[in-house]
Amino acid sequence: MSSLHTKTIPASDMPDRPAFNWLDDTGEDADLTVMTRDVTKIYQMGEEKIHALGGVNIKIATGEYISIMGPSGSGKTTLFNVIGGLTKPTSGNVFIDEIDVAQLDANELAWLRCRKIGYIFQSYNIVKVLTALENVTLPMLFAGVPPDEAQDRAVYILGRVGLGDRVLHTPKELSGGQQQRVAIARAFANKPSIILADEPTANLDLKTGEEIIELMREMNQEEGVTVVCSTHDHKMLNISDRIAWMQDGLLKKIAKRDEVDIEISQLAEK
Amino acid sequence: MAHKEWHIDRLKMKPGLVWQMAVNSLKVRISRTTLTLLTIATSSAFLIYLLTLPRSDDLADQQTWYLMLGLSVLVSAAGVLNTMLMSVSQRYREIGTMKCLGALDKFVLFTVMVESAILGFVGAVIGVIVGLTISILLGLLEYGFSLFQYLQFDWILLKILAAFALGIFLTTFGSSIPAVIASRMPPMDAMRGEK
């Protein structure tokens, strides 16, 4: 049923899979939440051109938890921003749930960010003038959820991330770890298809960081949301389904966790 | 592979939420709000005071009056525009975050504009009251109770309206340019734009 305010966008023509050199093997019939095809991003810095992404092809299956590793400057953040519709790729296509993001106008992009994608940032990016509760409620209000319902769900998720007794605190009254928990609650609020977490633990101490990652893994399993998480930390790999390595704007390798475990144990034997 | 479809229900901007965010933002940044109000109030107070000053028949006096009027508008314009510009450009990060959460461009724009309009209106109210009070008090000192024969209280409503228009115009105009830029920016650029 389509009404005046509803627009139906059919699935885009998918690129021929064999034509590309996919590094990963999600399987022919896996449900894909994200697929990128030869995505490049070039930043113009004065006279100099910076190739942040040099043709990235990645497929991410629905419900999986994938970690992206790589040194800073390897293009992780740019890849996140392109997947999340926060910035346009210079060339190539990004498909989210089989829809080519490039065809969306400004309003539809807002809808995508609101309903399909949850963001978690390194620097939390909690709205400073709002309480924890209001921060989590906001994306639901943008999505058109009735205020009472939005508030109920916000209280529930805040309780789920362990902030049940702090819902009315402002960001100033919360520690870094607690702010990141608010950010996680906010990202999951609209039950998105995909959570993009860009180095969510970089500003946190080791123990808090581990707690945050574990929380994201639990939420990923409970809500069935796909999680893409970039990190420097090798300890975070244990809970991922797959791990991708990036270098100089290119995807170098993608492996399942058990394969990585084998490699590590082989290294240990030598 | 099963083909999917998206049913995009057009996001709608809720005026209630715009109002709530604008008022909230003013309340939380209370010191900045007070400062801005002071700037606007001073400008419109001085304007209304000048407009009600007794008119002199002396040509030189009249020229000085026009000069003062022009200068006062110019100085207050510069002050208010600068304040509004600063207050919006300091919030690029917040604006970027809101856009990541699904805020429409016009939601961002309207919130900033409503906020500025409130500032302009409240500032003008304070300014008009203070300006008129000063004008009347000084008139009493100078002319006693026959002050209204001397002060220019003809067209007074129009003059008050002018002070309001100045206040609201300066605040909304001052914030409109950075607000339009910020609301159209891709969210990531807005978040990086903060210095």
Image (tube, coloured by chain):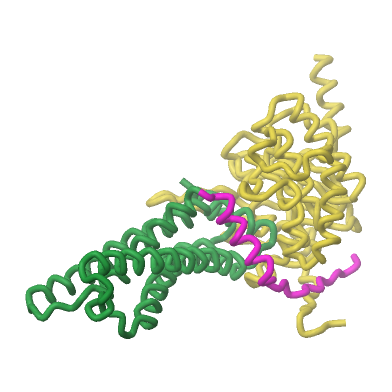
Chain colours: A yellow, B green
**B22 within the magenta span:** yes
Left or right: where A163 falls relative to B145:
right
Left or right: where A235 falls relative to B149:
right
Name the residue: 74% across, 42% down. A229
Nearer to me, A207 or B40: B40
Image-quadrant location for residue B99: bottom right
Left or right: where B141 falls relative to A25:
left
Name the residue: 68% across, 65% down. B17
Height in image: B181 above or below B25? Answer: below
Image-quadrant location for residue A37: bottom right
Height in image: A195 above or below A68? Answer: below
**B194 within the magenta span:** no
Span colored in magenta: B1-30
Nearer to me, A1 or A231: A1
Q: Where is residue A146 in the image (x, y as percent from the top left)?
A: 82, 66
Image-quadrant location for residue A93: bottom right
Which quarter shows the N terminus of chain A? bottom right
Q: Where is residue A72 in the image (x, y as percent from the top left)?
A: 59, 36
Q: Position of residue B67 (x, y in %)?
A: 17, 70
Height in image: B113 above or below A167? Answer: below
Nearer to me, B23 or A32: B23
Name the residue: 78% across, 64% down. A16
Left or right: where B53 falls relative to B168:
left
Residue extending farthest to the top is A270
Height in image: A18 above or below B104? Answer: above
Q: Position of residue B26 (x, y in %)?
A: 55, 56
Which quarter shows the C terminus of chain A? top right
